[in-house]
Image: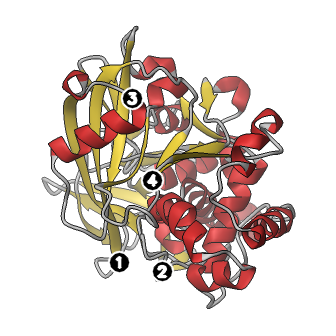
């Protein structure tokens, strides 16, 4: 019989890939018309628009295994940020961009204590390679304060940066999650696939049997019932659907077509929330400066992530902000679409441990371990390995 995986997001595809490689027959059922779950890319008149600003962190261990760099056409961001307040400040990783150290030191965003805290943080991240076994109770603001960062620098850099990563400007997230994400940025690169983030699930699904537009209506022991009453017998079932009680964080992103900015540095732009607490957007980037295929030749596509703690900004507010940030004429910036993702990130724990077995089923998804691409991939692999272990234990060769 077949092993059935419910859900063709990254976790379900990772589980199916692991099962297939072990010799199991696998069928993936997906309710939507396309695979990928929350990792999707739209094509609007030749402009690639990801459903929410997402990147692949190349230091992710699971990701490096399923998406080898020699098989993926990846383009990295520069390791730094441009911060927009009363003045424009630039901050770059001195280890990656030593020629730009003077821009960071001369930015005047730091106090002397901030510089010491950054060095301490950077050194403390060196040994972090994977998720912690169990999450601590400490929250991100307490962690940053304990390290000695000033309120000014936290509001100018960490809040817009990490607020965009975790979709929570208050940074009400576990300190372990912050440490892990910062370590991944420090150890590797933030990159985009040439053809958009949807290239990741597309690559992961190669060779798999996936049925889209297939809604699961009920699950019984060794049976999956889909719309129309069809019964699919299964020797094991992996269900990636989160419980209805799962709490979610949402995001809104506007995408614009524009001329190519004069400064083509492929870097993230942040709102200095210390100097401009009412800024209409949290951060912005031009992904076509990173991966050229995101826009037609001679054009650019610009993403702007809206604030999460204030009423939604208007298209005109965002357009004017981007015109200032990227030094472009506002009337040459054309709104392409606004992407709203209501279930963008689950409020999941930050831990490596995961119980895959659940009352005769197997569970996977980033909601079980860590809300990230790495968490999704890891949970899928762990669930699949639990299935393989249990099936081998039941096989005649083992019981004879």
Task: Residue at 16%, 57% (x, y): give it.
Answer: 229
User: Which mark's residue is nearer the viewer, 1 or 3?
Assistant: 3
Is there any visible trace of residue 364 in the rendered image?
Answer: no
Q: Are marks 1 and 3 in contact (CB under 8 Å)?
A: no
Q: Which residue lies at the image location 25% right of the left edge and 39% below the top edge?
A: 320
Front-most of residues 277 and 93 = 277
Label 4, secondary structure: give it. Answer: loop
Give me the C-alpha separation between circle 4 and circle 3.
14 Å
Q: Earlier in the sequence, mark 1 or mark 3?
A: 1
Label 2 environment density (alpha carbons within 10 Å; few <14, some 14–19, many ≥20): some
Asked which colour scheme the image uses, the reply is secondary structure
Q: Which of marks 4 and 1 precedes in the sequence? A: 4
Residue wearing tag 2:
172
- Give the residue number, with chain letter if any, for mark 3: 327
Marks counted in the figure total 4
**Is residue 118 toward the left or the right of residue 151 in the image?**
right
Which of the marked residues, 2 or 4, is nearer the chain's N terminus? 4
Mark 2 or 1, nearer chain start: 2
Question: Label 2's element?
Answer: loop
- Vertically, is 44 above or below 190? above
Residue 85 bears which disc, if any? Answer: 4
Measuring from the top left, give residue 295's x and y in whole percent. 38, 19
Residue 125's quadrant in the figure? Answer: bottom right
Q: Which residue is mark 1?
A: 246
Looking at the image, tell me whether mark 2 or mark 3 is earlier in sequence order. Answer: 2
Q: Mark 2 and mark 3 in contact? Answer it, CB < 8 Å.
A: no
Quadrant where the C terminus sits is bottom right
Label 2 to label 3, Cα distance in Å? 34 Å
Dots 4 and 3: beta carbons under 8 Å? Answer: no
Residue neighbourhood size for the residue with mark 1, other residues' Cα within 10 Å, grouped as few (<14), some (14–19), many (≥20):
few
């Amino acid at each position: 019989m077949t092993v059935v995986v419910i859900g063709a997001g990254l976790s379900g595809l990772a589980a199916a890939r692991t099962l297939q490689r072990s010799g199991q027959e696998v069928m993936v059922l997906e309710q939507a018309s396309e695979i990928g779950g929350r990792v999707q890319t739209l094509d609007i008149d030749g402009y690639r628009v990801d459903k929410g600003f997402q990147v692949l962190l190349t230091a992710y261990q699971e990701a490096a295994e399923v998406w080898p760099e020699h098989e993926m056409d990846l383009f990295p961001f520069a390791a730094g940020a441009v911060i927009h307040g009363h003045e424009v400040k630039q901050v770059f990783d001195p280890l990656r961009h030593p020629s730009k150290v003077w821009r960071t030191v001369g930015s005047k965003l730091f106090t002397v204590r901030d510089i010491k805290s950054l060095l301490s943080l950077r050194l403390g991240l060196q040994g972090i390679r994977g998720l912690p076994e169990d999450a601590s109770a400490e929250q991100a603001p307490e962690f940053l304060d304990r390290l000695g960062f000033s309120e000014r620098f936290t509001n100018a850099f960490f809040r817009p940066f990490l607020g965009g990563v975790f979709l929570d400007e208050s940074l009400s997230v576990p300190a372990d999650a912050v440490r892990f994400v910062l370590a991944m940025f420090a150890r590797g690169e933030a990159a985009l696939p040439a053809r958009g983030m949807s290239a990741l699930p597309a690559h992961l699904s190669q060779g798999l049997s996936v049925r889209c537009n297939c809604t699961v209506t009920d699950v019984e022991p060794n049976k999956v019932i889909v719309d129309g009453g069809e019964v699919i017998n299964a020797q094991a079932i992996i269900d990636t659907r989160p419980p209805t009680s799962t709490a979610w964080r949402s995001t809104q992103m506007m995408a614009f077509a524009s001329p190519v900015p004069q400064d083509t540095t492929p870097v993230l732009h942040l709102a200095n929330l210390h100097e401009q607490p009412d800024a209409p957007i949290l951060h912005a980037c031009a992904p076509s400066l990173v991966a050229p295929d995101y826009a037609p030749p001679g054009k650019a596509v610009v993403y702007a992530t809206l604030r999460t703690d204030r009423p939604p900004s208007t298209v005109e507010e965002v357009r004017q902000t981007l015109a200032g940030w990227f030094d472009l004429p506002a009337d040459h910036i054309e709104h392409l679409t606004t992407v709203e993702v209501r279930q963008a990130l689950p409020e999941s724990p930050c831990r490596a441990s995961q119980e895959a077995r659940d009352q005769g089923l197997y569970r996977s998804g980033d909601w079980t371990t860590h809300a990230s691409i790495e968490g999704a991939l890891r949970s899928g692999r762990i669930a699949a390995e639990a299935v393989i272990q249990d099936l081998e234990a039941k096989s005649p060769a083992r019981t004879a």
